[in-house]
Amino acid sequence: MNFNTTLVTGLFDLKRGELDTGFKRPFSQYLQHFDKLLRACKNVPMVVYVDPAHVDFINIARQGSVGTDIRTKSADDFRKWFSFYEKVNTIRQDPNWYNQVGWLAESTQAKLDLYNPLVMSKMFMLNDAAIFNPFDSENYCWIDAGLTQTVHPGYFSHDNVIEKIEPLLNKFLYVCFPYETATEVHGFKIDGMNKYANAKVNRVARGGFFGGNKKILSQMNGIYYNLLNDSLSDGYMGTEESIFTLITYTNPELVNVEMINNDGLMSTFFEKVKKLPIPKREVSISTVDVPEGVEYFQSEKEVDMNKSGKGTNLYITCFNIPQQLQLLLDSIEKYNPELLTSTNKYLIDNSIDESTRPAFDEIVKKYKFELIRKGNMGVCGARQWAAQHFHDSKAKYIVWFEDDMLMENKNIICKNGLNMHCDNWLDKCIKIIEEEKLDFIKISFSEFFGDHHKQWAWHNVPQNIKNRYFPDGTHKMTWKNSGCIDGLSYLIGDVYYSNWPSVMTKAGNYKIFLETVYASPFEQTIMSQAYQIMKKGRLRSAVLMASLVNHNRVHHYAKDIRKEV
């Protein structure tokens, strides 16, 4: 079976079997159902969090599976690992909290100091598993260790529900049941739920199964963390399900809500999924295997992309300060005027200060830009927008500038002793791309925070990629070869993507930005994505042995209004 989803689960003995209330449940009961789940899901890769004492138990149950990654942790570790342990412990012992409804004082939430820290950590463990990404999966779902108490294991072993569920994971999936109450949701007072949701809460999201695509998991983890922190600080506490419920109201654009019956049984959901067809998967051009003995391979789709089109699209993004944009344009006019005369010019105005519009409008008119105003898309959001716009255009190449990335004269050298000027560099870079069959070439060896002596993608790739390509922990750049065209020298290697200016082809733009589209396309995320495509032999890049960009922000805006996406 070709699964694209990793299941994440965990089991810890919280001493529930020692309770003297109706919530008592022996740990052996959990182990029994956990064993069923682990065996039923052998055709799905799993990340399992368990106490070291149960590693052998996991290995026996998962023998013959497609893959299991075991992460050891003790129950006691959650007192330190879970950031909100003290807040949770204070609230659970407060009579004003546990006396608000009859059942709560005898519940596991009130009686066990580790119950809420554990269940509230499900999202954090899921996010960590996606960062480890041991099976290079696109989707990550949490599944409770005891789920087979109410859900038949055959759904997983025979009905292929995990494979069939993938279309629902394009966003973040929450399974919810209708719930009307006048008082609380799992101990979270309803007035607080309504306040945070900014709506009347009439459903509850289940915590036994949830998840989605890894490209939005980090964002969802941040939303969850902030809601949990804010609500606990205000003295409200339920379980993880209370926070999941709020997310379905506060961020509806990021979630898929699947409703089940009033009884809340998850088997209803899996019975529905069971009847879905197995989704067809298209093979993306970045995952096509490179033929044996070939270092770099272009698919027919890529070749066709690069054959079509004519000319170059120049995109410049600006924010709130026309004077800074004018500095950039003055430098281009003085040192590389062809950049303004031989390109299709687009100005992306991210400004939130509407009083600056007349000045920007004058610049647009003077330099004959096409003006793009779509609110503040953020630096990286604007870059993502430009990628799609370029892809849909008739141009062949794209160049991207931010308004503080100025051109320089021929008498200046960079911190690495390289020239900071080259006449007619755009045409020369295009010649290099076509001669060397590159996807992109960066025009500046030295950048503001560093340079190309170092492989900066190392900071952003998942741990399994670090282990594979940087086993000794060093991350110096290595070069495959070099060249010189029309007096402009360059180095070819695994040159990392960054938002600094480059000349990029249609196929390179598609593979980096559009083949996988992230809900939050941060520069670090795109850098990681590009590096992993390179290591699959699907992306070829270079950097000039020159530093043509003078990063010079003369006019500053408040840091707290800067937006990335």
Image (spheres, grey):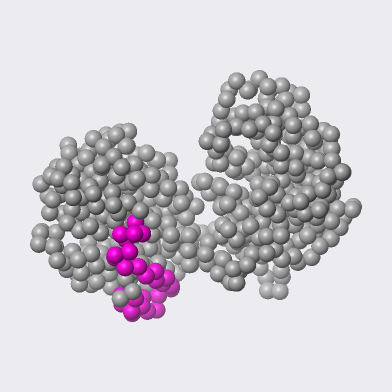
- Residue 134 forms part of the magenta stretch: no
Residue 472 placed where, x, y %? 60, 72
Residue 147 placed where, x, y %? 26, 62
Look at 32% across and 33% down and name the residue there.
198
Which is nearer the eye, 136 or 277? 136
- Let me know if residue 118 appears in the view: yes
Look at 58% across and 22% down and name the residue there.
354
Which is nearer the eye, 85 or 513? 85
**Image: 62 above or below 478:** below
Give the tally of numbered discs.
0
The quadrant in which the N terminus is found is bottom left
**Image: 345 above or below 458:** above
Residue 203 placed where, x, y %? 26, 42
Q: Is residue 485 left or right of residue 256?
A: right
Which is nearer the eye, 190 or 84? 84
**Image: 433 above or below 556:** below
Look at 53% across and 61% down and name the residue there.
462
- Let me know if residue 241 appears in the view: no
**Image: 59 above or below 325:** below
Span highlighted in magenta in the image: 54-82
Q: Is residue 313 left or right of residue 98?
A: right
Q: Quadrant of residue 318?
A: top right
Look at 52% across and 64% down and name the residue there.
463
Q: Residue furthest right?
A: 486
Residue 285 placed where, x, y %? 62, 59
The quadrant in which the C terminus is found is top right
Q: Is residue 95 left or right of residue 489?
A: left
